[in-house]
Image: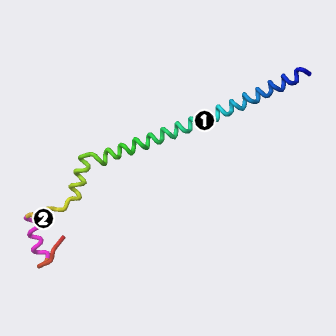
Amino acid sequence: MRMVPVIVVLAAIAVSLVHIRRQQVSYAHEIQRLRNEQVAIRRDLWDQQSRLGYLTSPKRIAGDVEALSPPDEAPSAPTAGRQGQAGKGKATR
């Protein structure tokens, strides 16, 4: 009869160890999932930084400024001949 409390205590310890081990495995899976998510977020950040670097490069900005600048006001020789033929008094743009 003296062995019953000892067996109960050992059984409780065994159950506790199994529970702790399951918790440990569960937390390890959660840590791995979060690390994978972190890698994906860092990859997205890298892509955004690369795209931002491309969009703000001096060569790209100079090209955009040139594309958005208004055309020259002085007509060139071939354009001047066309304006006269297009219509008398009509502006062509």
Q: Which mark is residue 73?
A: 2
Q: Amino acid at mark 2?
A: Glu
Q: Where, by quadrant of the figure, is residue 19 drawn?
A: top right
Q: How many marks?
A: 2
Residue 60 at what x, y percent from top left? 26, 49
Magenta segment: 77-86
Magenta run includes residue 81 = yes
Left/right placement of residue 19 relative to residue 82 reads right
Quadrant of the image containing the C terminus: bottom left
Residue under the image location 44 percent in, 40 percent down? 42
Left/right placement of residue 43 relative to residue 50 reads right
Q: CA distance from mark 2 to mark 1?
A: 68 Å
Quadrant of the image containing the N terminus: top right
Left/right placement of residue 89 relative to residue 12 reads left
Magenta run includes residue 75 = no
Q: Secondary structure at mark 1?
A: helix
Residue 81 at what x, y percent from top left? 8, 70
Residue under the image location 40 percent in, 41 percent down? 46
Residue 62 at what x, y percent from top left? 22, 50
Q: In the depicted view, which residue is nearer to us: 85 or 44?
A: 44
Q: Where, by quadrant of the figure, is residue 25 drawn?
A: top right
Residue 17 at what x, y percent from top left? 72, 28
Depicted 80 relative to depicted 44: above or below? below
Q: Amino acid at mark 1?
A: His
Depicted 60 relative to depicted 9: above or below? below
Residue under the image location 47 percent in, 42 percent down? 41
Depicted 77 relative to depicted 14: above or below? below
Decide: few, some or many residues near mark 1? Use Cα within 10 Å; few <14, some 14-19, many ≥20. few
Q: Secondary structure at mark 2?
A: loop
Depicted 5 relative to depicted 52: above or below? above
Name the residue carrying label 1: 29
In this view, the residue farthest toward the bottom is 88
